[in-house]
Amino acid sequence: MTTGRGESDTPLCATCGVEAAEPLPEVCPVCEDERQFVPTGGQEWTTVRALSASGRSLAIAEVEPGLHALRTEPRTGIGQTCYLATAPGAVTTASGTGAGASEADSGDSRADATSRRGGLLFDVPPFIDDAAVEAVAARGGVAAIVASHPHMYGLQLEWSRAFDDAPVFVSRIDADWVQRWGPAIRLYDGEAEPVPGIRVRQVGGHFPGSSVGLWRSPVDGGLVLLGSDSISPVARQGWVTFMRSFPNYLPLSARAVRMIASRVADLDVERIQGSFGQRTGSDGARAIAESAERYAEWVSGAYDDRI
Ligand SMILES: [Zn+2]
Ligand SMILES: [Zn+2]
């Protein structure tokens, strides 16, 4: 870990908070997409240094023992809550059968050759500075990084660099959305275990490669699903939703939501954390199954007698 983390000139989109590379496009592709938006005033770019100098900070709160929520304050970019999930053991290595991992296979989810300490950073803040890195290091640090989908890439390579080039796992099917590439990026398909005992699984829907995080509480053994924009707790306890676009309120089809639910149907999900800090406190598996069926029925017209 080195200092000066907030001093890079790395550009990022001010609207979605995704890091970019020079030469910058005229408009951020992530925001131009129908799931996001370009502000009425037009595209705005900022830099890591400008945000760091703006008085922002990373607020960290313990959600439950071993799981921390990370939020940039004041709200920046999409305003997502990111999570630091602590590894079950103190010393960790990335998963897989990666003996002989080399440049040639850096594009898959096989093991990182280095033994790493730390947990999984799931979804990535659009902000970084020395204080933020120190605060995360004090809570065990980062062994691997996974953004659930392109809206949550944030400053993924900046955070990787701050933790000894921790591997950044990206869903291969969504890889065209990556705006800034680096050797830390590992492409994966389906499911990966970036940190032993902590898995990510692609469920699709919001993006084809949208993934959820799967972390088991060391206290009660409950499986916590980090749903991000794929499986999202809503105001009513025990309900979740599924959307193609949250800011633009674009729904998904009945087939899509049933697909998402089916891809986690084998899991004994107890709790669900959302991308804005919202939470399902218990019986998560039932919340997903019932909510998916309700949603599918609504978008299929089953209740059109009520409209
Ligand atoms: Zn953007
Ligand atoms: Zn999203």
Image (cartoon, helix red, strand yellow):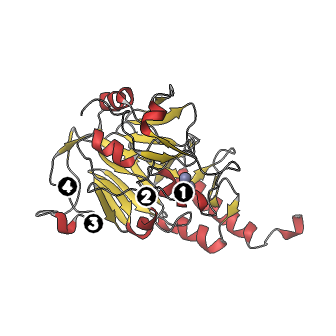
Q: Are marks 2 and 1 in contact (CB under 8 Å)?
A: yes
- Amino acid type shown at disc 2: Gln
Ligand 2 within 8 Å, label 4 CB: no
- Amino acid type shown at disc 4: Asp
In the picture, measured across the screen, residue 285 lies left or right of residue 155, that is right
Q: CA gap, disc 2 to disc 1?
A: 9 Å
Q: Secondary structure at mark 1?
A: loop
Q: CA gap, disc 2 to disc 4?
A: 23 Å
- Mark nearest the camera among 3 and 1 is 1
Ligand 1 within 8 Å, label 1 CB: yes
**Mark 3: few/some/many CA within 10 Å (<14, 14-19, 20+):** many
Asked which quadrant contains residue 230, the reply is bottom right
N-terminal of the pair, mark 1 or mark 4, is 1
Q: CA gap, disc 1 to disc 4?
A: 31 Å
Q: Quick check: can you spot residue 57? A: yes
Read off the residue under disc 4. Answer: 112
Task: Point out residue 300 in the picture as x, y percentages from the top left corner.
Answer: 74, 73
- Amino acid type shown at disc 3: Asp
Read off the residue under disc 2. Answer: 179
Query: Which residue is nearer to you in this view: 295 or 71?
Result: 71
